[in-house]
Image: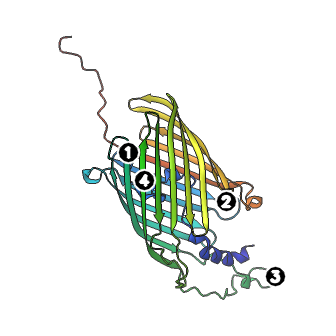
Amino acid sequence: MRFISGIVFFIFVSTLSAQDIHYSQFFFAPSNYNPAHIGDFDGDYRFVGNERRQWASVTIPYQTFAASFDAHDFLKVKGLGTMFSFQTDNAGDSHFTTNIFNLGASYRFSPDSNNTFVIGVQAGMSNKQFSTQDLKYDNQYNGFYYDPNISSIENYTKLSTNYFNLNAGLKWKFNMNAKTNMFVGASVYNITEPKESFFQNVNIQLDRRYNFELGVEYRVAPKWSVLPKVLMSFQGKYAEYLIGSMVKYDFISEPFNEWKLLAGAWGRTSDAGNLFAGLMYNNWTFGVSYDINLSNLQPASQYQGGLELSVIYIWKKLPLRQKFKICPKYL
């Protein structure tokens, strides 16, 4: 019943708000899982956009949007990556909103042609706020129906809170042979464990989040590759394991005309599974996935979870295309 929305809201504030924003397409949301991913791409500049919408079958949809912009070699300094990112998340009747602004930097160095190490840091401000306009309470039930003119007897002295945050990470990339390369990454978020209470309660803090990633790309045929990836995240008493793989097919491989098709599936620790499809066209990458809910909420969700979209654009200097063939002078 919507009469208990206020109670549900406070449960979210005291428990679920202690978890960070997360994505099923974690491999297309790099700065959300390891600052060492900043600037580590083939190109000069990268834009990443993520959008997620979930629980539409159960309640008011929870919606998340993120955008980031990073540079490969900032100011032409070899190995220096920089980034700006923004995330916003809106949930439930209270319009509980989380806004996150981050700046980040990384440094890459390669002791030899097969190994690359990256260290990254990220810092910024977060804001959490809610609205009471659409909340309804048991006290507003007059015995027959809900009456908005009855006082809720709730007194909110603070509808918004801000805090500083700090994240850091490491990554190692290794080229095993001509067909296989891999990476291992580890990071920690919320290093300062900031206070996020709306009631000045010093015991309500944002737990540190520890992430561990492993990814491999193995070319099984001239046009086919498999890319298994694993993500393990730990935050307070919560743990999340994402295990799965995608396949990549080089549909067209021509100068200035590259098309690659992606498809994959991941499972998330008896909570959900998701199916993924993607397209890489020259400097553009597009991804779409859908979560299939397998948790205890399944009777209400009817297996419906969340739709997630991603887009990546990488700008890099390319040699100019010749519009015609230049013939030798003796012809």
Residue carrying label 2: 56
Residue mark closest to the camera, 3 vs 4: 4
Kindly identify the amino acid type of the residue bearing the numbered disc 3.
Phe
Q: Residue 269 in the image: state x and y as whole percent.
A: 65, 56
Residue at 77 percent of width and 59 percent of height: 299
Residue carrying label 1: 115
Relative to 323, residue 11 above or below: below
Residue mark closest to the camera, 4 vs 1: 1
Q: Residue 312 in the image: state x and y as whole percent.
A: 45, 47
Kindly identify the amino acid type of the residue bearing the numbered disc 4.
Lys
Of 50 and 103, which appears nearest the observer?
103
Nearer-N-terminus badge (4/2): 2
Dot 1 falls on a residue whose secondary structure is: strand
Of 39 and 324, which appears nearest the observer?
39
Q: CA distance from mark 2 to mark 1?
A: 45 Å
The reply to whether dot 4 and dot 2 touch (C-beta < 8 Å) is no
The reply to whether dot 4 and dot 1 touch (C-beta < 8 Å) is no
Residue with the most extreme top position = 331
The colour scheme used to paint the residues is rainbow
Residue carrying label 4: 171
Do we see residue 142 in this rendering? yes
Q: What quarter of the picture does the C terminus occupy?
A: top left
Q: CA distance from mark 3 to mark 1?
A: 71 Å
Nearer-N-terminus badge (4/1): 1
Q: CA distance from mark 4 to mark 2?
A: 36 Å
Is residue 8 rendered to the left or right of residue 233? right
Task: Give residue 75's mark.
Answer: none
Relative to 265, residue 150 above or below: below
Q: Residue 135 in the image: state x and y as whole percent.
A: 65, 77
